[in-house]
């Protein structure tokens, strides 16, 4: 297909993925791992998926400085100018702001899609079609667009978007954003037909997002507006400026900073086999199961009277289990985790506790 040279992609790739501990670690987060056994990491799959729509030279990867070598190794086709290295973690709003100012210096007419690096999308043709529709909308409207996923069940791990009447095909004005609901509220949301999962995938023109950041988080805009002229068009000058100025940005998500405050926010309702692969349970749900509804991730397991478990074990170890139901059993790099799936929201706390008690070696 013909690719519009004014279209860009920003892949956000700086997270630690601590909910997938101990597989996902600070030194090797989940986006750099071949979680699905396809021979491709989640980052590589994200890059390949968007490169059918956006020219490869217009794809930027924003990550933490410690992962620079991993990005270079896994995406050898991109240049140094396409890798934006954050000196500190400041959530998604400063990350997106930097990318917007960087792209604006190169192409003031640009439009862009912002995507996390660790999502799984199974129907890539539908994804491509939805992204093209989104680009066309933001290129002809002063709009901030998010992709809303048609819910398949009452999920408590996702944020929800309530939509108003459709204004343009599958594109609607946003009524409200709601953070992760409890199960009863999630059931109400799904039954109503008005609520969609918040995918965390956004499209907008560079002009619209810069204006929104200036209006709603002026402190962040001020950081990037303070750069001397020509900074974002010069790799060395930009690196020096970012190292000095970026840590001063407030840490805030783009959802809180802009999307929940702006009046020109829209949602494109989509269905392309999306999973944010945020938890062990999410991986369990999308993985093939054996006759006892157990999932084994590239490991040897013998089970007796055990159902609904996920086993992810690195190395040659044989796992023999009797009488286990609905558990996560994960073993990697000196850490063995055994945790009920219903308690997996505690894993982040477990990582913190391990770090406090035993130092950084288990982070």
Image: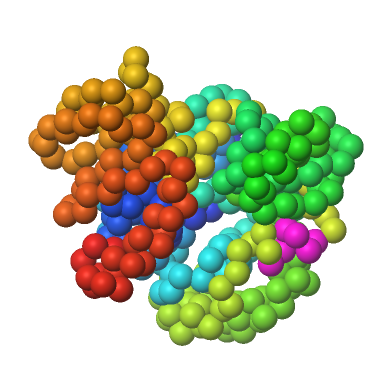
Rendered location of residue 160, percent (x, y): 69, 46
- At a point 80% along the width and 61% down the height, the residue shown is 262
- At a point 33% along the width and 67% down the height, the residue shown is 353
Rendered location of residue 230, percent (x, y): 56, 76
Q: Nearer the viewer, residue 37 or 55?
A: 37
- At a point 63% along the width and 31% down the height, the residue shown is 153
Q: Nearer the viewer, residue 27 or 248?
A: 27
Q: Nearer the viewer, residue 30 or 289?
A: 289
**Hey, which quadrant is residue 349 in on the image?**
bottom left
Rendered location of residue 357, percent (x, y): 26, 72
Report the residue that reaches farthest toward the top.
291
**Hey, which quadrant is residue 281 in on the image?**
top left
- At a point 23% along the width and 23% down the height, the residue shown is 304
Please indicate, yes or no, whether residue 270 appears anywhere in the rendered image: no
Report the residue that reaches farthest toward the left.
316
Q: Is residue 260 magenta?
A: yes
Rendered location of residue 314, percent (x, y): 18, 41
Magenta-colored span? 257-262
Horizontally, is 265 left or right of 360 in the view? right
Horizontally, is 290 left or right of 144 in the view? left
Q: Is residue 166 magenta?
A: no
Placement of 89 over or under 166, stated as above or below? below
Instruction: Please identify the quadrant where the C terminus is shown.
Output: bottom left
Please indicate, yes or no, whether residue 88 appears anywhere in the rendered image: yes
């Amino acid at each position: 297909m013909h690719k519009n040279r004014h279209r860009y992609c920003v892949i956000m790739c700086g997270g630690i993925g601590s909910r997938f501990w101990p597989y996902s670690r600070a030194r090797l987060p989940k986006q750099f791992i071949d979680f699905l056994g396809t021979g491709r990491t989640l980052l590589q799959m994200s890059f390949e998926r968007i490169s059918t729509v956006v020219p490869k030279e217009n794809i930027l990867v924003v990550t933490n400085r410690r992962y620079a070598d991993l990005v270079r190794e896994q995406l050898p086709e991109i240049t140094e100018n396409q890798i934006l290295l954050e000196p500190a973690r400041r959530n998604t709003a400063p990350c997106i702001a930097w990318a917007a100012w960087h792209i604006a210096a190169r192409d003031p007419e640009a439009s862009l899609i912002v995507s996390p690096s660790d999502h799984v999308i199974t129907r890539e043709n539908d994804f491509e079609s939805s992204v093209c529709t989104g680009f066309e909308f933001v290129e002809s409207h002063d709009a901030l667009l998010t992709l809303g996923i048609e819910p398949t069940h009452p999920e408590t791990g996702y944020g929800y978007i309530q939509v108003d009447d459709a204004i343009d095909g599958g594109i609607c004005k946003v009524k409200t954003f709601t953070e992760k609901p409890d199960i009863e509220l999630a059931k109400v949301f799904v039954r109503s037909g008005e609520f969609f999962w918040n995918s965390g995938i956004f499209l907008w023109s560079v002009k619209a997002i810069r204006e929104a950041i200036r209006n709603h988080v002026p402190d962040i805009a001020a950081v990037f507006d303070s750069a001397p002229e020509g900074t974002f068009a010069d790799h060395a000058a930009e690196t020096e400026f970012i190292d000095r100025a970026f840590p001063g940005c407030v840490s805030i998500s783009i959802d809180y900073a802009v999307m929940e405050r702006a009046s020109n926010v829209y949602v494109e309702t989509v269905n392309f086999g999306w999973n944010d692969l945020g938890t062990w349970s999410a991986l369990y749900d999308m993985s093939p199961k054996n006759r006892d509804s157990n999932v084994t991730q590239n490991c040897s397991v013998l089970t007796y009277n055990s159902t609904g478990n996920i086993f992810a074990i690195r190395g040659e170890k044989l796992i023999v289990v009797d009488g286990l139901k609905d558990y996560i059993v994960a073993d990697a790099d000196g850490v063995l985790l055994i945790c009920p799936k219903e308690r997996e929201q505690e894993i982040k706390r477990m990582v913190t506790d391990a770090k406090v008690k035993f130092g950084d070696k288990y982070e």
